[in-house]
Amino acid sequence: MKETFAKLSPFQVDPDRVDIKLTRADFEKATSEEKSSMVETRKSVSYWRDAWRRFRKNTVSMVSLFIFLMVLFFAFIGPKLIPYDYANQYRSSQKLAPGEYSEKEALIKSIEGKVQIMYATALQPGSITALSAGNYYIKLGSRCYCFTIDKTLGDTVIAVIDNNLVTIKERDIKDGEIASATPLPNLLMSEKVAKGQGYVKLQAVKRVFPHVFGTDSTGRDLMARTMYGARVSIIIGVTAAVIVLIIGSIYGSISGLAGGAVDFVMQRIVELIYSIPEVLIVLLLQVVLKDPLQNWFDTSTSPLAKAMGDLGSGIVSIFITFALLYWVTMARIVRGQVLQLKKQEYVTAATALGASSRRIIRRHLLPNCVGQLVITTCLQIPSAIFLESFLSFLGLGVSAPMASLGSLCSDAIATISLYPYRLVYPAVVLTIIVLTLNLVGDGLRDALDPRLKK
Amino acid sequence: MGLYILKRIGVAMLTLLVIMTITFFLMNAIPGSPFLTEKSTPQQIELANKKYGLDKPLIVQLKNYIVNYLKGDLGTSLKMQEGTSVNEIIFNQGKFGLSIKLGLLALLVAVVIGIPLGCIAAYRRGGWLDGFLRVLTTVGVAIPTFVLAALLLIVFAVKLSWLPSLSGNLTNWKSYIMPIISLSFYYMCYIAKLTRTSMLDAINQDYIRTAKAKGVNTRGLILKHALRNSLIPVITYLGPVCAGIITGSFVVESTFSIPGLGKYFVQCVMSRDYPVIMGTTVVLSALVIFMNLVVDIAYKLVDPRITLVSAEE
């Protein structure tokens, strides 16, 4: 400010000491560009940029945000990076401890890198089942070959060693070395290029991926399930929070702005819902909604029903529960904010200019409580995740083979004395999600609403 | 004050009535009949419906419930223990007693440990103890009850065998430890956090400085001056805690095999035992509503500045 003034001020120059030669051109009026170049301005800082600047200074919240992003990566990108699927039951890989290989996977593992191993795509990577008699089609280098197997081979790995197709059985492997390999019996190899003639395509898989978190009693990979479960839990949390945000903010702002009798009635309803022990009603709702929802999914052809059917009735009834019972806290907070804001001059001005209540709520009131809205929504997510995991624990949440972190924990608790490690991963991921969201929420509170900071 | 309490009791009764109505329609919306089994014929179902008055119009059934409840009669069980009165199941078979004992003890532990922890953290602000407590309470509110319960079970019952893994009817003191810890831990942490925040608030007030200047010793300062004022947010939080402890008890009772009301509620919902569903819902709701009432009155006792009439707006 001082410098700006200095530049603008002509009195700064002492005419006695400085010899100034003035020409006529110096008395031309300044153009507007010249004027604006004289004024030094700083870019105005937007609300979000300002909040982000404050948030960034908060180390704990920044670390939490980073960890939460990692969990998001784990949940949403992770499943694409591992060759296992959450629902598939990998035969012969049941009940593996973290990092353990089943006998057959260990077999493949021991000859890994020494040979190129082939599997039929119809089979699951990592599992070896009997190759039935028939024609198979493989690609070696740039050439395609066809081979015929005329009897069942049993638990055999088909491998390529020095460009020859051989079979290796478990007994052929000693100390991780291939002691003997049998050429494919009755093998008829011929050059063959035509695709799509009913041959099973054999695919090369480079290596066996470990079951990092182990497998469950039916042979499902627990890492894939934990990733999927984290995704389901996060989706439930965010959706429920958004539902609460929408209903709560509309209800709260109407109640706050309307005042009088409307407000009185609306607040009594809120108080009533607030004092209902919601868990009892939630449990009843879950049981009540299950069959009708399933019916609707099965019969209705609307895209909404289809999308919800993919989620399953358990999750949809959680959303309905949130829409019915959990918006009251948000409504209370928004109402409190609106009561403060509606006395501000700009609301009076908007009213005087003839703005409708709808416009005042949308354009003036809600944008001004955005900080509170963001914070409350952020803190609502963990509470939704908790509720879902609680319901899953009681056997009411998602239904198998779908998984959520709660249902994974609940499955693990059922077998906890035998396989305690199964509880660790979903429980840790669940705790991390809730913990980081809580800390991010705290950081947001400080960043978005500096008045609250002590 | 008396008028206020009367008014609140009236509102509480109304709330209970609404809860009864909601529960009634919800449980009647559960598909299927309570008497439907593989063997039952339509005639048998009809007879059973007649016997228990389920053939009457819904509104008449609801009226009967309300009238009977006012007389203190909660009806008789249809399924689990056919013919036994619901009062007997809830109160005399120890179910309610167990849940109440567990719930109140957990509440007590949460308050009695949580508040001092919060005070210590606030008083030693910035020290290692404060740091430790902050980490503990932050993690504590992020662990679901059932995970904590399972972890305790695996460590102390299975690996170390110090404590019994089945708590049963809570006959000896050892069987209390794990259920109480898992039930109260979350709330203890939350209360400690709340106390710390409001305590810090109070410590920075002028009257504390004045008291210090007058030479009040630290203990008196914290206990007499700061604590009383910082308890208000904690007391407001106790209402939700009561509801939450009931939620927690569902989990804890099933983890430690305690035949309490929580576990029972889930069973009777599954088996559509209408009178038992209604009975447990009303008893548990009444408990929560009663605790909320107590909290509101305690609120007034701690802070005389709060006038109860204006608290109603």
Image (cartoon, rainbow, N blue to C red):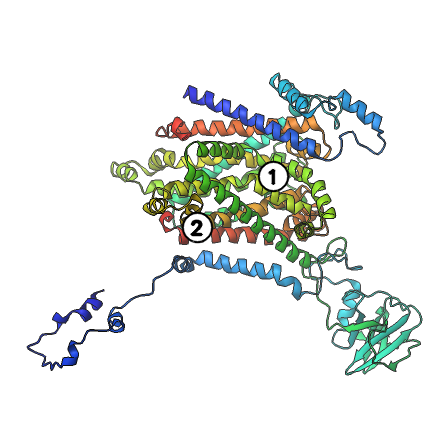
Looking at the picture, how far across and down is residue B11, in whole percent?
50, 25
Rendering quarter of residue A102 = bottom right
Q: Answer yes or no: are tags 1 and 2 on the same subunit.
A: no
**Image quadrant containing the N terminus of chain A:** bottom left
- Residue identified by numbered label 2: A370
Residue farthest toward the front in the current orientation of the protein? A354
Instruction: Tell which of A304 and B219 is nearer to you.
Output: A304
Looking at the picture, how far across and down is residue A274, in whole percent?
52, 35
Vertical relation: B83 (above or below) B130: above
Please state the chain letter of the residue tagged with numbered disc 1 in the rendered image: B
Residue type, numbered disc 1:
Met
Rendering quarter of residue A3 = bottom left
In the image, is A11 to the left or to the right of A301? left
Mark 1–mark 2 Cα distance, whole angstroms, equals 42 Å
Residue type, numbered disc 2:
Val
- Pointer 2 local density, CA inside 10 Å: few below 14, some 14–19, many at least 20: some
Q: Is residue A64 visible?
A: yes
Q: Is residue A333 visible?
A: no
Answer whether labels 1 and 2 touch (C-beta < 8 Å). no
Looking at the picture, how far across and down is residue A399, in whole percent?
71, 47
Vertical relation: B285 (above or below) A153: above
- Residue identified by numbered label 1: B178
Instruction: Tell which of B199 and A51 is nearer to you.
Output: A51
Given this view, does label 1 or label 2 mark the residue nearer the observer?
2
Instruction: Tell which of B255 and A402 is nearer to you.
Output: A402
Residue farthest toward the left in the current orientation of the protein? A16
- Pointer 1 local density, CA inside 10 Å: few below 14, some 14–19, many at least 20: many
Instruction: Tell which of A40 and A55 is nearer to you.
Output: A40
Vertical relation: B53 (above or below) B125: above
Rendering quarter of residue B175 = top right
